[in-house]
């Protein structure tokens, strides 16, 4: 009986390790897919939509596990991303290293379809969103990949 329990625990550990490795590999793949510069198409904070005219100067760039949000070319927020590509929707933890929200880790989810990404973040880092619309303490965004000039 004891051997069976040890065998089950060992098997469960291997499955969990494999899941973690697959999840980490999926996260690395997601980071590569996100690389590039994106423009903001829509933004909602605590259920209130930000006017489209206010978004024209906002961009976000992803390079590896790093992100940088700029407004009119000036960095307003930057940090690192950790992605769990094994979850649906994909889970993302964005740790802010400079600018607005410095020192916080925003818990989020996102969905990528072609060159359009929908995301929602809990800005307080307390509760991961479950939908792509914002409620108290949350921000939802839609961003679109900028086309590379040839």
Image (tube, helix red, strand yellow):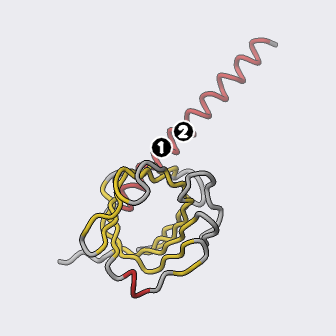
Q: Which residue is mark 2?
A: 20
Find the distance from the CA under tag 1 to the CA under tag 2: 6 Å
Position of residue 142 measured from the top left corner of the image (x, y, whole percent): 48, 75
* Numbered disc 2: secondary structure: helix
The percent coordinates of residue 83 (x first, y second) are 48, 51
119 and 139: which is toward the camera: 139
Residue lying furthest top: 2
Horizontal side, residue 2 vs residue 115: left or right:
right
Q: Position of residue 126 (x, y in %)?
A: 61, 51
149 or 18: nearer the viewer: 149
Direction right: furthest residue = 1
Quadrant assignment for the C terminus: bottom left
Residue at left 35%, top 58%? Answer: 99
Q: Are marks 1 and 2 in contact (CB under 8 Å)?
A: yes
Q: Is residue 137 above or below residue 106?
A: below
Q: Please give left or right for residue 120 compared with residue 114 in the image.
A: right
Which residue position holds label 1? Answer: 24
Residue 89 disc label = none
Residue at (40, 60) in percent of width and height: 100
What element does badge 1 sit on?
helix
């Amino acid at each position: 009986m004891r051997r069976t329990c040890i065998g089950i625990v060992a098997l469960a550990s291997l499955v969990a390790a494999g899941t973690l490795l697959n999840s980490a590999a999926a996260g690395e793949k997601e980071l590569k897919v996100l690389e590039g510069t994106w423009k903001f198409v829509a933004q909602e904070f605590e259920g209130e939509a930000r006017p489209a005219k206010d978004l024209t100067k906002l961009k976000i760039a992803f390079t590896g596990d790093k992100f940088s949000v700029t407004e009119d070319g000036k960095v307003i927020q930057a940090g690192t991303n950790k992605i769990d590509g094994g979850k649906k929707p994909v889970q993302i933890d964005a740790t802010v290293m400079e600018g607005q929200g410095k020192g916080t880790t925003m818990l989020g989810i996102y969905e990528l379809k072609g060159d359009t990404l929908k995301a929602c973040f809990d800005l307080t880092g307390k509760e991961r969103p479950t939908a792509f619309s914002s409620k108290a303490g949350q921000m939802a965004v839609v961003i679109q990949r900028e086309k590379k000039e040839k």
